[in-house]
Image (cartoon, rainbow, N blue to C red):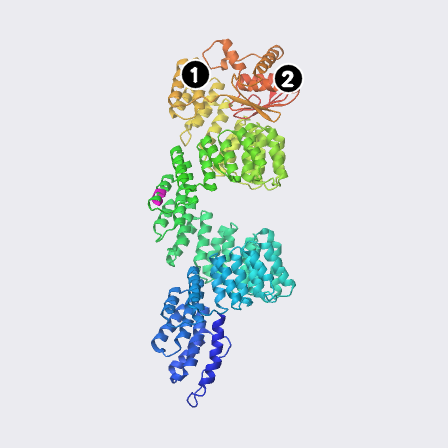
Amino acid sequence: MRYLSHLRQCTTTTHTTMLTSTLPPNHTLPTFSHRPISLKEAFQSLTHFFTDPLPTTTRFPLQQAYSQALELCASHKALPQGQQLHAHFLKTQNYLDSVFLDTKFVHMYGKCGSFYDAVKVFDKMSERTIFTWNAMIGACVSAGRYVEAIELYKEMRVLGVSLDAFTFPCVLKACGAFKERRLGCEIHGVAVKCGYGGFVFVCNALIAMYAKCGDLGGARVLFDSGLMEKDDPVSWNSIISAHVGEGESLEALSLFRRMQEVGVESNTYTFVSALQACEGPTFIKIGRGIHAVILKSNHFTDVYVSNALIAMYANCGQMEDAERVFKSMLFKDCVSWNTLLSGMVQNDMYSDAINHFQDMQDSGQKPDQVSVLNMIAASGRSANLLAGMEVHAYAIKHGIDSNMHIGNSLIDMYGKCCCVKYMGSAFEYMPEKDLISWTTIIAGYAQNECHLDALNLLRKVQLEKMDVDPMMIGSILLACSGLKSEKLIKEIHGYVLKGGLADILIQNAIVNVYGELALVDYARHVFESINSKDIVSWTSMITCCVHNGLAIEALELFNSLIETNIEPDLITLVSVLYAAAALSSLKKGKEIHGFLIRKGFFLEGLIANSLVDMYARCGTMENARNIFNYVKQRDLILWTSMINANGMHGCGKDAIDLFSKMTDENVLPDHITFLALLYACSHSGLVVEGKQHFEIMKNEYKLEPWPEHYACLVDLLARSNSLEEAYHFVRNMPIEPSAEVWCALLGACRIHSNNDLGEVAAKKLLQLNTENSGNYVLVSNTFAADGRWNDVEEVRSIMKGNKLKKKPGCSWIEVENKIHTFMARDKSHPQCNNIYLKLAQFTKLLKEKGGYRAQTKLVFHDVCEEEKTQMLYGHSERLALGYGLLVTSKGTCLRITKNLRICDDCHAFFKIASEISQRTLVVRDASRFHHFERGLCSCGDFW
């Protein structure tokens, strides 16, 4: 502190003059020069006095020797040496000026971080000077004990201690840290009243205080006032640092530029503050410019500046430049290593971070707590359990594993590595736990699907009457979702409301969970109760609707969102694209695509994938291909989406060609890619190719097939009439055949009239007792086709006992930006009579000119032939077609979507309809697309 230097200079001048006349003849007084000396030299000076005793009148040089040694202990934070000096002083030198040296001891202990030792010395002092009070306030601030610092200042005022200029910086720092702007203003007034308001270092402290209290305007007024010395770099540093601290990077950099223009020389702190202002990729050009200025100055070797440069380049994502600066440093401290390590973690360079941590140890630099925390983060985010365990062992070895921050990070790391056992152990071994500890362990259990453990821990938190924060509630909501428990989510919702915890984050999460549990009305109620909805609120409700098959409502919500001032984000747009795809609403899809372009979203990543999927599901492969070809950097998801799109439209060979191109570009396929590829082969009858790629998946890419892959291959073999081969494949599967496998085999047996094998598949399907009503309907239809009505009734009884209902057929068509939906034999549409009349006339035309005959054998009900015919005429896709023919002009392409597979009779009907009406009819059913044109279908009657 500056007042201590001032005191030392005064005592040196006065006391040396006094003592020279009292020394014994031929005795030399140790010399105290103003040159910098080391701690070792200071101790040697003291030793001189102890080994060459002087009369008590020589106490002043000895006092100065103590002072100089204590100053060096403080600057080097050499606490053990300082304590040694204090012990020796108390034992042997009690005749020295106690007030002066006790003040020095308070200062030394404060600087060395030994707050309680400083308090002990201060409390024992019977007499205190202003320097003593200043030293104690400084010790409080150094220890982060801001309340105590402010209380000491108030006590000084009560006792009437005369303040000096050096009292104010520390007290103002405490006000800033504690956001005590009102008290800061009062102290500002006191400083002015005492005549210290114009002191540069007081003004700088005031600027910092106002900035930290959120009053940048006050800080700026003070800086721009005539009180500040405009050529003082400390003043510039204060205001630049103030703007950086408040996140006003552009203003901070503007001030830095002005400082350069007016010729004020920048110092280390100037450069560090300016570099801290470059907080993202958009500032990289300015950051490089500052680097150039540093290289021209004499600060380019300064370790603090170099560390700031590493941090700047890391924050801007330029890790090569950060590493270059690091390697060029002549001296690297622990902060240098940690800054680069943190940058690697920040930029997802987890392997590099792990290697860097090892290099740090190999270089002889001992990692500290910050190093360990970064290493734990790198291990967790990369799910590198071995690296995480190694750094845990390092923490134990060096005695820092008991640190609460490290303990919390270890819990998080083990959770991310899916190592629940070690996660629990790390939590249990923590000597002290805070709210973050409990929140982290609960989140770890929830994320690793140990939902009951998460709930049990919440109960412990409640029993111990600890606070429950939104993060903890969010994890518990995840557990409720995982357990699929309607009761639990309602209980947690009630707890949130009762405890007043219903902030917007929690409300959004509750909407999500209700949506996942298909409780749409509850989700809607919570959504509507949110007063200030944000984009997450809207997206959560839109996603809830999409997830529960309410695509029309999702699009209506999106339209309402557009009318607000809230901008949709990436997730919102992906959700509404999915809604448009679910409805096969090409017009809506194009509108959303246009919105994306207007708002400047790039056609990449999730957006590109969603657009490809949307156009494919809306029946326009040309648009899907255009999006795919436009994207330059194609990821695996985009390739898979395009392969799936081709399969959906029966373009199996195109799907195989795409797969070959993808592997040529060194993009590795995953399970989903092969599923899309096998699906494409199945719907194009590419048996040989399908079998080949199934083997490639297993042998070349070492991917163990999922049940879905087996079901796809069985479907491919069976529908190509290789039923015996398909059955042989099923019997030799290395896993238990799933319901999907038997369903694929049974469906093909119906198509190819293999009743014996169909009987086997039907029995196996019933034995599995699945919750999918479609499987029971398939078995029922198989029995009905053979006239086994008793067996049909038995299957229906099983369904009723399991509370399963047949999924009703539903089709829809979009006309003039409106979706018109029809159920089988539906009569709810406003133009119902006209639709049935139009359909009757058109069916008669198809009979007369196209040779259409109703295939009543496909009606699996024990009714007369006439009623069977009428049931076929009332299929939902025909009603949608009838409406399209009624309200659109001749030649218009009609696009119809059905939630179930189109039946053989309707398929034949649509083929003839396309020729007679001279229209292109596009039907998307539950399996694929059918493009009917000129009496033919794109599926080649293979679907």
Instruction: Check disc 1 and give the amino acid type.
Output: Phe
For marks 2 and 1, give the CA distance: 37 Å
**Above or below 67: residue 356:** above
Placement of 362 over or under 26, stated as above or below:
above
Residue 277 rendering spot, x and y as whole percentages: 57, 56
From the image, tell me which residue sits under label 2: 917
Of residue 11 and residue 51, the one placed in the foreground of this image is: 11
Residue 460 highlighted magenta (yes or no): yes
Measured from the top left, where is residue 54 in percent x and y? Answer: 39, 84
Judged from the image, the secondary structure of the residue bearing numbered disc 2 is helix
Residue 751 visible in the shown view = yes
Span of residues in magenta = 457-461
Q: Name the residue under label 1.
A: 783
Q: Which residue is most to the right?
A: 890
Residue 479 among magenta residues: no
Could you tell me the amino acid type at mark 2? Ser
Rendered view: 128 above or below 909: below
Query: What secondary structure is found at the residue carrying circle 1?
Result: helix
Q: Is the magenta stretch mostly helix, strand or loop?
A: helix
Residue at 62% in and 17% down? 886
Res. 324 visible in picture: no
Quadrant of the image occupied by residue 851: top right
Q: Which callout, 2 or 1, points to the residue nearer the camera?
A: 2
Residue 398 image-quadrant placement: bottom left
Position of residue 73 measured from the top left corner of the image (x, y, whole percent)? 43, 70
Image x and y of residue 914, in percent: 62, 19
First reached walking from the N terminus: tag 2 or tag 1: 1
Tag of residue 72: none
